[in-house]
Amino acid sequence: MFDVTDIAKGVAEGNFLLLAKTISQIENKVEGTDAYLANLVPKAIPIIGITGPPGAGKSTLIAGLVGEWIAAGKKVAVLSVDPSSPFHKGAILGDRIRMKDWYLHPQVFIRSFASRGHLGGLNSSMIELTTLLQAVGFDQIVLETVGVGQSEVEVASLADTTVVVLVPEAGDEVQMMKSGLMEVADVFVVNKSDRPDAEIFTNHIRQMIMEHGVSDAHLKVIPTIASQGVGMKELIQALDAHQIANKELDTRHKLIVAKVVQLIVAQKMRQLDLIKLEEDVAAAISKEGFNIFSFTQNYF
Ligand SMILES: Nc1nc2c(ncn2[C@@H]2O[C@H](COP(=O)(O)OP(=O)(O)OP(=O)(O)O)[C@@H](O)[C@H]2O)c(=O)[nH]1
Ligand SMILES: [Mg+2]
């Protein structure tokens, strides 16, 4: 596998070839991956997770943030995870088009991943890849995931700062309560604030989080019009504020514990030979008195 110093040199020069190759190697778990990961020396660059319903404007928003960060001379990495559900075709292409300004920019590395077929291993790959990014010289790391099912909760277990993007539409607040977004969001963005009633919706969210005992609701709910670049500076301020607060409270260890658990689970899963398991089950259930617990103990 490639030397981290060489990858970092490429990143510094805007050449991401070695980085891209290394990402593929890690994803494919080529020989030596575990040792390679174990020798990384990551910097404490916070990971920003951006989630929200399909089409809320996450990619447009990220493109806006990237613009601000680039202007400040930063190196930015964006990983986006597509749930690849059949009703969501073209997500990758859509992202390409919206982020096209940045695709060839020497300060920006963008890569999309499909979550299908990962069997719960997506988070462990993301932990691996974000740690690699932290070790090769990026200043900002963003993870985009479409908020369907449990993915908001999953992204929150990867990100130091979780941003939930909402749009002013009737029913969204109900959806938000339902999926427990209040617990995972560090910052709320009300995007498409050019829509009618955006202000009412924004105030509604602010009130809801105040009822949750959050006093600085104005800092936590940011109205944006991503397609016009409106609200980007305010959002960056909110991100910075959260990261400073995080540092003071030293909440990092909780997140690390969650990540360690995910890595252990993923490692156990990798050790499991599913084909053999299926054969073993087929053999075991034909016998009388099959007991699922005693059977499972053979795999502990
Ligand atoms: N009116 C309006 N449209 C916007 C705004 N931000 C984004 N859009 C549009 O909303 C559509 C979806 O934007 P995306 O950035 O692809 O949304 P997304 O959340 O990344 O979508 P997925 O990744 O497919 O879930 C695009 O047509 C954008 O141009 C906004 O602030 N106002
Ligand atoms: Mg997107």
Image: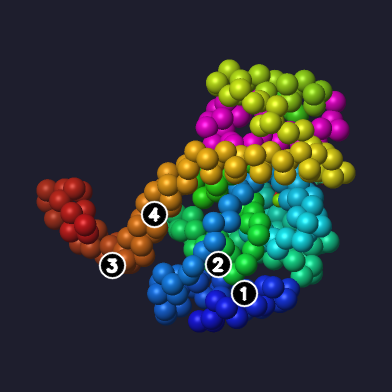
Which residue is disc 1 drawn over? 8
Disc 1 residue: CB within 8 Å of ligand 2: no
Of labels 4 and 2, the one closer to you? 2
Amino acid at pointer 3: Lys
Amino acid at pointer 4: Val
Instruction: Residue at 60%, 44% (x, y): give it.
Output: 243
Q: Is residue 253 left or right of residue 94?
A: left
The picture quadrant where one finds residue 245 is top right
Q: Quote the CA–CA distance across marks 1 and 3.
A: 41 Å
Q: Is residue 180 above or below residue 123?
A: above
Of labels 3 and 4, the one closer to you? 4
The colour scheme of the drawn protein is rainbow
Of labels 4 and 1, the one closer to you? 1
Front position in the image: 105 or 290: 105
- What stretch of residues is rendered in magenta? 171-196
Q: Is residue 240 above or below residue 216?
A: below
Q: Work out whether mark 1 precedes mark 2 in sequence or the reverse, and give the earlier one.
A: 1
Which residue is disc 3 drawn over? 276
Q: Is residue 186 magenta?
A: yes
Instruction: Residue at 65%, 39% (x, y): give it.
Output: 241
Residue 111 in the image, given as x and y percentages of width and height: 66, 64
Amino acid at pointer 2: Ala
Which residue is disc 4 drawn over? 260
Total numbered labels placed on residues in the image: 4
Residue 128 in the image, given as x and y percentages of width and height: 49, 63
Instruction: Residue at 32%, 60% (x, y): give it.
Output: 268
Q: Work out whether mark 4 precedes mark 1 in sequence or the reverse, and give the earlier one.
A: 1
Disc 3 residue: CB within 8 Å of ligand 1: no
Residue 129 visible in rendering: no
